[in-house]
Amino acid sequence: MRQLSSRVLGLHRRLAALSAASASSSSRCLSSGPSPAASTRTTSTSGQSLVVESLYGKDLAASHDTLIEHLWKDSCVWDDKKFLTCAVSGSSYTYREARRLTHGFARALAGGLGGLDAKGQRLCKGDVVAVVAPNTPEFVLAAHGAIEAGLTVTFVNPLYTPEETARQLAICGTRLVLTVPILLPLVRAVAQKLPQYVGTVLLDQQPSEQPAGEFSFQCLAAEGASTEGVRLPRNAPEDVAILPFSSGTTGMPKGVMLTHGQLVSNLEQNLHPDFRFALYTRGDVQDTLLSILPFFHIYGLNSVLHTSMLSGQHLISMPKFTAEDYIGALLRHRPTGLAAVPAVVQFLSMHPAVKPDHLASVRYVMSGAAPLGLDVIKRLNDKAGRELDLRQGYGMTETAPVTVLCSRHTPLDKRGSVGQLLPGTRARIADLATGEDLGPGQRGELLIKGPQVMKGYYKNAEATREVVDDEGWLHTGDVAFYDEDQYFYIVDRTKELIKVKGHQVSPTELESIIRQIPGIADIAVVGVPHERFGEVPIAFAVLQPGAKVTEDEVTSFVEPKVAPYKKLAGGVKFIDAIPRNAGGKVLRHQLKAMVTK
């Protein structure tokens, strides 16, 4: 999750000091835990390595399922139950309807039906398909159909500018885009530059005449369902299923290759009896989960959508958050669970329009993408009039995403932790200076190994080697420690991502844009605390001798090139020199101190 070096489930914002690790630090997103009294199990290997193994099992039984097989394996039990509903449009599908459309679309893609092979360029296994859309039920059905057809799906934030969108599509060699009518002008503008582009599929438009190269999802799915003789390619656990993008402070956003096997492994880890949230659907019992998490984010995709499918839940999704729509959904759908980010939990706990009755049906809350303080948890419980099952955890896009979770067994005094290791997950804490392994209570970089760790960065072996070592350990860039009961605490992070309203913003990306401005000699971007947004980017600029550049000129130059949450909301400060160490690395903490003093 480094843009997450991808940190998605909950990448943590930098926690100031964590002297009492359970105080103001919080987690990322989900849950876990055995008996609270369990003691840490560590293993020394090669004399020097101190490996912390999960208390829930050293190894995870290998699954030979591919992602779509796994997601639908038990669906016959809840075929006629509601699967997915849009809280705004009301568009809704049962599990049976969703499976029929997903499979039909997969057959259309694999068979080149409906004119998809008109250019003689039929899609082949492993080709990349991009989804450029907000949350809609059809987003899910089409993406799953593409994966079932042996294609790899990448997800583009619909808030991206044409420049950002074009870059991601070009890196992936995208051959087909799935989008919605409102974003069609954007897609048309960038797709024409793609060398082997097959076409564009409109997700939520009713079947009608389409211009050449543009197709209706509904038409393709219907044709695929009714056409005989189409054979789907055979997928394997080691095949790359999705390609979400993660950005880090050492470069531009990178494609994270997650295989069928890695995604399925993390689903199995999440659904361990001590970690799972929802009840399995049986008879008239069906949990309803209300989520504002975007499907283009690994948290919303694998940790929310996919886990809900494996329990047979009814997922209520929202294309964006508005107070009116969210409060209305609470009353209209009476959810038993909420998938949220800290800003939404805080909204529920403090907004005067949210009454205890709005929370009457809620049994559990999963929160991720940023820390959630104990004070907010207590306020929400007070408003609900009872203790909700509210849990957090830690993960990254590079780990599909969850590695550490708090469970229902987690005692109150451990709620400041991010939980314990998932089954089959191992961790080490490495000294930041020497790289030597550290024991309980000692702070160092968190290293993770497990079946959920990514295959690597797409077409970027060098970047992969920087974060995954020869022994398969993923170097998270986060400073952490664990206690005697194997609860992990995130103290700081070595990768200086800026977390704005739950989004990860890469300083390097903004710096590379600002450097294009004539007169800028040196530049550094950091995140500074913001009451509403968590953090916002602020730029520190050094001008060339005699140059005259204003703050407005810098912010105006950046604004049209980035998504709204990446704008320089913290402003621009002009200084004489960027503080750096002997190796040339920017001393960002000194820049932060200039603002926070």
Image (spheres, rainbow, N blue to C red):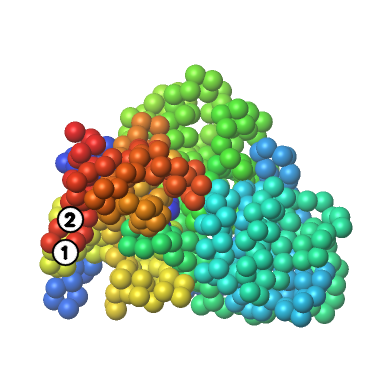
2 and 1 marks in contact (CB < 8 Å): yes
Q: Which mark is residue 583?
A: 1
Residue visible at 84% across and 66% down? 223
Q: Residues within 10 Å of mark 2 (few under 14, many from 20)?
A: few
Residue visible at 52% across and 66% down? 243
Residue visible at 60% across and 27% down? 324
Residue 76 position in % (x across, y down):
70, 60
**51 or 273, which lies in front?**
51
Element under disc 1? loop
Residue 290 position in % (x across, y down):
58, 40
Locate residue 43 relative to residue 341 in the image: left or right: left
Residue, far front: 546
**78 or 298, which lies in front?**
298
Amino acid type shown at disc 2? Arg
Element under disc 2? loop
Q: Which mark is residue 580?
A: 2
**170 or 273, which lies in front?**
170
* 516 up-or-down from 413: above or below: below
* 196 up-or-down from 330: above or below: below
Q: Which mark is residue 246?
A: none
| Number of numbered discs | 2
Q: Quadrant of the N terminus?
A: bottom left
Answer whether residue 497 is visible to the viewer in this image.
no
**580 or 16, which lies in front?**
580
Amino acid type shown at disc 1? Gly
Residue 65 position in % (x across, y down):
57, 72
- Per the model, the C-alpha gap separating discs 2 and 1 is 8 Å
Residue visible at 29% across and 74% down? 469
Locate residue 41 relative to residue 339 in the image: left or right: left
Answer whether residue 120 is visible to the viewer in this image.
yes
Q: Quadrant of the C terminus?
A: top left
* 347 up-or-down from 459: above or below: above
